[in-house]
Amino acid sequence: MQTCAPGRSPSWVSRRRLLEQKISELHKCGNLSHIKQVHAQILKANLQQDLYVAPKLVAAFSLCRQLALAVNVFDQVQQPNVHLYNTLIRAHIQNSQVSQAFVTFFDMQTNGVYPDNFTYSFLLKACSGKAWFPVVQMIHTHIEKCGFCSDIFVPNSLIDSYSKCGPVGITSAKKLFELMDEKDIVSWNSMIGGLGKAGEMVEARRLFDEMPERDAVSWNTMLDGYAKAGDMSEAYKLFEKMPERNIISWSTMVSGFSKAGDMDMAKALFDTMPFKSLVPWTIIISGYAEKGLASEASKLYDQMEEAGLKPDDSTLISILAACAESGLLGLGRKVHASIERTRFKCSTQVSNALVDMYAKCGCLDKAYAVFDGIAKKDLVSWNAMLQGLGIHGHGKQALQLFARMRQEGVFPDKVTFIAILCACTHAGFVKEGLHYFHIMEKEYGITPQVEHYGCVIDLLSRGGRLDEAYKLVNSMPMEPNCVIWGTLLAACRVHNAVELAGEVLDVLVRLAPSDPGSFSMLSNIYAAAGDWGGVASVRLRLRSTGVQKPSGASLIELDNEVHEFTVFDESHRQSDKIYQMIDRLNQDLKQVGYVSSVQCQ
């Protein structure tokens, strides 16, 4: 029979054991209310200094995105050890506070606590992109000084991070890989994966063939590299040679052919799969939806449900995103009906996807209804609704929603301001748009990016203030891209600014010599001005480039089928009726005084 410590009753011991069990499971709990209750019990038991308990609390609060509470727990510990510091560093990184993670990293050393191999691994996982290359180099130097290079776990993390830093990073990764005295399967896979991401598939294949041992991860890494490079021929050859294929192998191939536009091959592989989880179902349905093949996507969605598979959040979000991009409102509505039929409540992430889908498909009433029904709106919720209002010309409602957003204490980001500037542009609110552009950095600390400048240049151009737009283009702190110059050229067409249009075209030809759209637009500008010599000159210049201008296309969904039309297209089975209706519409427009502008396509 178990005895109690002197002065401790059996009930006290029982309560203590129950608390210890709760603490041990804290890092897996996502219920903030429950975590706070356990925290109160920890304080009552005077365990807040315990170096086993504190990391569990920090991780739990991090899981609920309550960083202030996590930091508060950390600050209560008088002598934190490396494990507690690592937990806080990881919490900052998981909550997109990378700079604060590095502050904690430097603080721990100032306080005499030295990093271990996990510290460097957490920091390196946060370093992804060209801008992070100097930081990865700094961490690498630190690792060598502290003698951690002999722990294979650390150089493997370095290879992975270097590989995510672009061409200069992949060069450093290759040097590090070659210098490693000992390599394990992770080392080889990290290096091959990095080469694949960099598009260096010849080098990746060489290493793959040299590997002393290959597991399923190695084969799948190569398949993924070929698929990302668009080389599905080599991917399929390798796929056929695989000694064993798993769900990842099959899904990678289905995804690769889908992205390459070969839906017949994607479907053939999908049908051949020995086992289908939600992942390949999501890939194939999204693939058909992205291509605008509404009927096929809808049938597959029905088949997935008939197979007894209940779509999870990831599946729903992926399919809804594909519907949003291709305008498949029918499939989007079917997915929404399925959600309402099978779920007690909808997560914020899925609701956000629904708002985005309805908004991009032009159903703003439905988008707003879903938005208003979101119990816990996050920044993505507000941005999706703002963008929907903006692109459809509801500028006043967008600005009112932004004001409501700020009243509710939601802080905007760069995407919010793109939505606001876009809303002002489509509504013709030049004064308001300039106001928000000027305050975004001053009041919110958000430095304007090229997208924000593009919105303002479009705003000024549409308002006829071409001189101001041109000055802004030339005073941008970054190099203007083709989109910005194209925006200015389009404004020149609207406002018949022939001289400025010629200057802008010269820049566009230097930046994108193979784009025929700019030549066509300048030709229209000359035609509108009656300068037929200018039209001929542009046509000759375009012909000399050898580039053909593709015909514009319009798409419309009707009864679960997407119809595509191009200029002078007579391939549609009802083309006679369609042209008869166009003639009727033209006659009606002429009767109310409409006169078409001169276009020279």
Image (cartoon, rainbow, N blue to C red):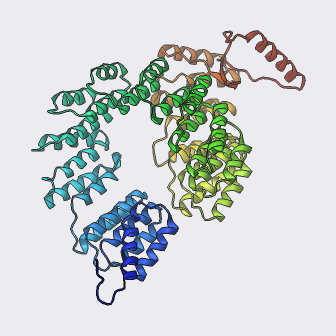
User: Is residue 491 something one can see in this rendering?
Assistant: no
Name the residue at 52% across, 68% down. Answer: 33
Q: Residue furthest right?
A: 591
Q: In this view, does 336 lie to the left or right of 307?
A: right
Q: Is residue 373 left or right of residue 184?
A: right
The part of the image, by quadrant, that contains residue 530 is: top right
Q: In which quarter of the image is residue 593?
A: top right
Residue 363 visible in the picture: yes
Tally of numbered discs? 0
Say which quadrant the C terminus sits in: top right
On the image, the x and y values in percent for residue 3 come to 29, 81
Horizontal and vertical percent position of residue 257: 43, 23
Q: Residue furthest front?
A: 1
Looking at this view, name the residue that lies furthest to the bottom: 7
Q: Which of 509 and 379 is in front in this view?
A: 379
The location of residue 545, given as percent across then percent down, is 47, 16
Is 206 left, or right, of 533 in this rendering? left
The one of 354 and 413 positioned closer to us in this rendering: 354
Q: Residue furthest left?
A: 181
Residue drawn at 23 percent across, 34 percent down: 215
Look at the image and tell me in which quarter the N terminus lies.
bottom left
Residue 566 pos. (x, y %): 65, 17
Camera-side residue of 252 and 50? 50
In the displayed structure, 6 sits above or below 220; it is below
